Image (tube, rainbow, N blue to C red):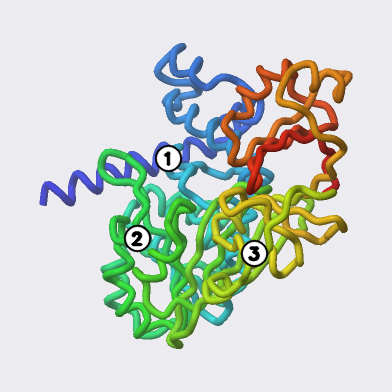
Amino acid sequence: SSISISFSTFVKKFAMSFSELLRPEVQNFLLEHEGADEAEFVLKGKSILGIPASLLAEQLRGRRKAKDKLPSFYKAKDIIYPPQLNLEQSSSEVTAKFKASLVKGNQLIDLTGGFGVDSFFFSKQFINVLYTEPNIRLLEIARHNSEVLGATNIEFHNLTAEEFLKNVVHTDVVYIDPSRRNGSVKKIVRLADCSPDVTLLQTEILKKASQLLVKASPLLDIQMGIRELLNVSDVYVVSVNNECKEVLFLCGRASQEPVIHTVNLLSNGSQQSFDFSFAEERTAESDFADPKVYIYEPNASILKGGAFKSVADRYRINKISVNTHLYTSDHLVSEFPGKVFKIETYIKPDAPSASLALLDKKANILTRNYPLTPEQLKKKLKLTDGGEHFILAFSAQKKKYVTVAKRVS
C-alpha cells in the first residue's frame, strides 16, 4: 500500500542519517563544537559534513543537556540524542537509578520506552527488560544507545502500550511514564488526561503483573493520584537538590493505606528521607511557637507530600504558624530533612536596620508567608545577593519577623 511504502521510505531515510551521524569525523566535529551556539550552524547553511545542520544542532543540544542530566550517556562515545522535547521528558540519571532501586524481579516491561533512559537503568536490576515504543525513530535511538552502553538484556518492540499489553501473559513489574502533553504541546497533569491513559490500562496490567510503577507529574495532587489508581501501596515524592522532579505510585495486589516516602536526592550522593501516612498527618498535633534559636524549612518533597504536622511531631519541634511551613526549636536537630538556620538577630524591615546588621550589605533572602517577595524585600533593605548571611522574613501567629541568620545545614 502507499502507506507502507511511505513508512518504508521514512525508515530508510532515517537509517541513512542515523549511520551518517556515527561517522568518526561527524562525532569529532560534535565533540569539538560542544560549547558552540548550534543556532549559528543552522543559519550558516543547509548541511555540514553532509549532515543537515538542524540534525547536528539537535545532537549538540542533546549532548550539552546530557552532561548534567545523563552523565553515563555523556561520557560514552557514539551516543545519539533524540529531539529536544523527548530529552526533556526523559528521566534524569539520578531519578532513573532511584526508580530502579524500588522494584525487583526477573522481568520488567517499560510501556513508554521513549529515549530509553529508564529502561537502561532498569536493565541493571532485572534479568530481562521489554521496551515498547510506537515512535520508530526513538526506538532505534534507544536500541543503538543500549548497545553502546552494553545493555544486552533489553528487547525492543515497536508497538503502542495498548498493543503490547495484549500479548503479555505475566511479568513481575510494569512501568509506565505517560506523556503529560496534549496535541498542542501544553503540559497536562491528571493521569486520566495523559497518554497512554494508565487509569484505563491498570486493571489489565494488574492482572498480568505483580506490581505497577507509575511516574507522574510533580504537579499532580497526590491524593488525586491515589484516587485515580488501584491498590496504591507506596508513593514516592522525589526531589533532586531540593527541586521536586516526580511523583511515583507503586501499585500492587494488596489494598492498604499508602506510605508516602519523601526523598531528596543530593548531589553528594546522600539523600534526605521522611516517611509518613495521611492518617498520621491527620492525627498529628502541632505545637506553635514564636521563633526560637533555630529555624527549619522542610525539603521540597516533604512540602509537596504535605507532612506539615507529622514532621514537627516526629522531630519534636514547633511550627511557626498554621500557614507558615517553617519550624523552630531551642536545640539543634541536625538530622532534620531540610534546611536549618541559626538566628543571629532580629531587624526592622528597613535599610538602616539591615545596614547595621550586615556591614557588607549582602544577604540571601527568603520570604515565607510574608507580604513582600524576596526581590521586593531586597530592594527595600538596599541589599545585594550573596554573602554568608540569610534574611528570613516570615509571619508567625501574632506578628511578622525579619531575621538575620546563618545556614547550619
**Tag 1 or tag 3, which sits nearer the N-term?**
1
- Left or right, 370 with respect to 88, comes to right
- Left or right, 75 with respect to 221, comes to right
Camera-near label (1 vs 2) is 2
Measured from the top left, where is residue 121 in percent x and y?
A: 59, 62
The vertical placement of 214 against 369, above or below, is: below
Amino acid type at image mark 1? Leu
- Of all residues, the one furthest to the front in this rendering is 398
- Left or right, 44 with respect to 5, comes to right
Judge by depth and name the residue closer to the eye, 345 or 233.
345
- Distance from the alpha carbon under mark 3 to that under mark 1: 44 Å
Q: Which residue is mark 2?
A: 191
For label 3, the SS is: loop
Residue shown at 48% from the left, 42% from the top: 88
- 10 Å neighbourhood of mark 1: few (<14), some, or many (≥20)? few
- 10 Å neighbourhood of mark 3: few (<14), some, or many (≥20)? some
Quadrant for residue 283, please give it: bottom right
Amino acid type at image mark 2? Leu
The vertical placement of 161 against 28, above or below, is: below
Judge by depth and name the residue closer to the eye, 201 or 34.
201
For label 1, the SS is: helix
Q: Are dots 3 and 1 in contact, CB under 8 Å?
A: no
**Tag 2 or tag 3, which sits nearer the N-term?**
2
Amino acid type at image mark 3? Ser
Q: Are dots 3 and 2 in contact, CB under 8 Å?
A: no
Picture disc at residue 85? 1
Residue shown at 37% from the left, 77% from the top: 230
The vertical placement of 220 against 87, above or below, is: below
Camera-near label (3 vs 2) is 3
Picture disc at residue 286? 3
**Tag 2 or tag 1, which sits nearer the N-term?**
1
- Distance from the alpha carbon under mark 1 to that under mark 2: 20 Å
